[in-house]
Image (spheres, rainbow, N blue to C red):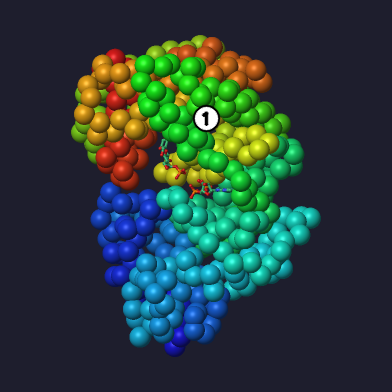
Amino acid sequence: MTSSPTEVITELADALKEWLPTQRWFAGKDRAVESVTPVQAVSLVDGDPALVHSVIEVRQNGSSDRYQLLIGLRSELPDHLGHAWIGTRAQLACYDATQDTELTGLLLDLIARGESLAGLDFQHEPGAELESGLKSRPVGAEQSNTSLVYGHHYILKLFRKLVTGTNPDLTLHRALRAQQCEHIAEPLGAIQGSVAGEDVTFGMLQRFLPDAADGWAMATASVRDLMAEGEKHPEEVGGDFAGEARRLGQAVAEVHADLADALGSGSEGRELLETTVDAMQRRLDTVLAAVPELGAHEQGLRAAFEDARGLTDPIAVQHIHGDLHLGQVLRTVLGWVLIDFEGEPAAPAAERLSLRSPLRDVAGMLRSFDYAAHQLLVGYPGGSEDQLTERALEWARRNRDAFCAGYAEKAADPREHAVLLRALELDKAVYEVAYEHGNRPEWLAVPLSSIARITGS
Ligand SMILES: Nc1ncnc2c1ncn2[C@@H]1O[C@H](COP(=O)(O)OP(=O)(O)O)[C@@H](O)[C@H]1O
Ligand SMILES: O=P(O)(O)O[C@H]1O[C@H](CO)[C@@H](O[C@H]2O[C@H](CO)[C@@H](O)[C@H](O)[C@H]2O)[C@H](O)[C@H]1O
């Protein structure tokens, strides 16, 4: 490589403008990319292949976000890396190096050795003895970040959109580990560094749970079973999920209790309600401007948010998961594990780190039961009164109740806060409208139809 790492990224800028919107983890797919510039770039491996670690600034619609890139450079790109190609410069193929097992092994080895390289600190958690020399494979699932699995042992998440300060995913995992929480995958290491003088977390290594099934796959299999059973009710079919939903409710309540013990909790009154409802209304303004289909429900949404403003009881607050849904929970033989404590990918860092009502996580999970029940019906020609829709509603009701009942076995019953819970659920559904609009427009009907049902609009 004759050019400097920064020159490489600068020369790749045009290719990156095309490539970024094709990546699942790129958060700005709904806006044109105006420019891509390197904030910093360092060489981690010289030679052929070479490896450059870079932070880029992506400008869109007048604002900008920072993303982490690992760029591989090779004189010849083998076929198995063809899908990772970004562009060619100075006769070198430049590609997404997270897909290159010849290069990614180094990241685990550096963490295992606890080394610093080119301004990046590769750390293992105190007492963690890590095996090195393992090859990685990328996690197949489409995600907000890029995760690599090493053997059957470890999973390394490389954060894509960067936030300043220690990433909440790492902070909360460390806090839960200190509480010996049973419902997490143990954090084992991290890649830390700085960008423009501010600390940044680039990666987090965790114990990989090879035999875990994800909650979304389990729940949707249960819905499919039910729909195949014609006239039967959820409790009458073998694939009933309510027992798991109850255990999941217990696990979420236990994680909340551990987070509160580790990081503190409080109680808030009027001021929090005002800022919470103001934020809901602002989010609604933004999403309404982007997704006209939401307009039909504006009145119902605003009224539900304002109902919450009128509440008088104090609200318990603490650190929470922040983006809890069935895709963020894994069922192992020992029980449920929660993953990905990063919060909503689109939320500002300060909001993700603030103390909030744990009912937000409950609302996220309730939304997810609704999603699991209704996503099979996307594009389905039946009317809203037909039998499959009835089954979907029944499944969602049963599992939402079971989840709340499980939660109530370990903490206060979330159903006692119906007005706030309803507002939080609707706020989450508004977020989902924006999320689906930007990422999976064919699924937009899922949150929209829930909003219609909940608000009666
Ligand atoms: N400890 C783990 N063991 C097994 N699989 C995991 C583990 N952590 C994450 N996964 C898998 O990797 C996927 C991505 O992880 P996640 O933390 O949700 O990343 P993202 O921030 O990109 O959404 C999850 O959906 C899950 O399937
Ligand atoms: O990438 P993350 O897992 O951090 O979260 C984002 O993507 C999720 C989809 O993968 C999205 O979740 C929505 O769809 C789920 C089904 O795919 C459903 O279970 C959730 O209830 C629904 O919110 C999530 O909102 C988004 O932040």
Residue 139, above or below 440: below
Please name the amino acid that badge 1 sits on: Asp
- The correct choice, above or below, for 10 with respect to 287 in the image is below
How crowded pointer 1 is (Cα within 10 Å; few <14, some 14-19, many 20+) is rated as: many
Task: Give the image quarter of residue 84.
Answer: bottom left
Visible residue check, residue 178? yes
Position of 255 relative to 441 (above/below): above
The residue depicted at 53 percent of the width and 82 percent of the height is 46
At mark 1, the secondary structure is helix
Residue that carries the numbered disc 1 in the rendered image: 361
User: Residue 161: image x %, image y %?
Assistant: 45, 54
Q: Residue at x 37, y 16 (%)?
A: 231
| Left or right: 247 as drawn, with respect to 39 | right
On the image, the x and y values in percent for residue 304 come to 36, 17
> Which residue appears at 31% of the width and 70% of the height?
15
Which residue is most to the bottom?
2
